[in-house]
Amino acid sequence: MPGHTSNASATACVACTRLGRILACCRKPKPSRTCEDCAAIDALIARELPDPQTARHEKQDRIETLKLQTKAQGEENEGLKAKLVEKNRLLNARKVALEEKVGRNAFKRKIKAIEKARRKH
């Protein structure tokens, strides 16, 4: 990248040329290297910006993908909730069956011991 010239009437640096005007830093006599400000401005100007329609299309695709993922996760969540309800129903049925086999007082003692052990872990 060409640097600054020491004369403002001479050819300006690339950043000033792209802007179409000479910046204040280029008006001062300087060595023939590009200053940091002009280098940063030149880098920003040279950076390629995506086409607005392409960017919009990519964003819409991303939104649709996220919607589909959300829908799939919602369906999975509903399936897991149904399984939880079924497991709770089965657990309650087994508790009733165990209560009938063991007797009411012994059953309550066993359940309390199990719940106490769960809380420790």
Image: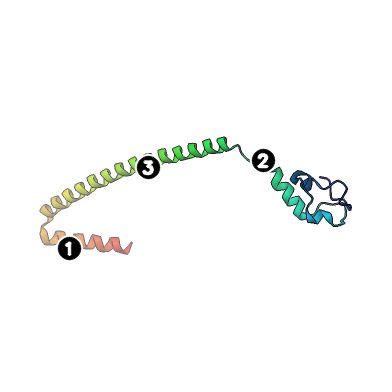
Q: What amino acid does circle 1 point to?
A: Arg
- Measured in 3D between alpha carbons, the distance from the residue under mark 3 to the one under mark 2, in whole angstroms, is 37 Å
* Residue pointed to by mark 1: 109
Number of residues whose C-alpha sits closer than 10 Å to that of mark 1, classed few (under 14), some (14–19) or many (20 or more): few
Instruction: For mark 3, give the secondary structure.
Output: helix
Mark 2 or 1, nearer chain start: 2
Number of residues whose C-alpha sits closer than 10 Å to that of mark 3, classed few (under 14), some (14–19) or many (20 or more): few
Instruction: For mark 1, give the secondary structure.
Output: helix
Q: What amino acid does circle 2 point to?
A: Glu
Front of the two marks 3 and 2: 2
Looking at the image, which residue is at 70% across and 45% down? 45
Closest to the observer: 66 or 110? 66
Label 3–label 2 contact, CB within 8 A: no
Residue 78 place in picture, x, y as percent:
30, 43
Looking at the image, which residue is at 48% across and 38% down? 60
Front of the two marks 2 and 1: 2
- Measured in 3D between alpha carbons, the distance from the residue under mark 2 to the one under mark 1, in whole angstroms, is 73 Å
* Residue pointed to by mark 2: 48
As displayed, is residue 48 above or below residue 7?
above
Residue 98 place in picture, x, y as percent:
15, 52
Looking at the image, which residue is at 84% across and 45% down? 2
Residue 103 place in picture, x, y as percent:
10, 57
Closest to the observer: 30 or 9? 9
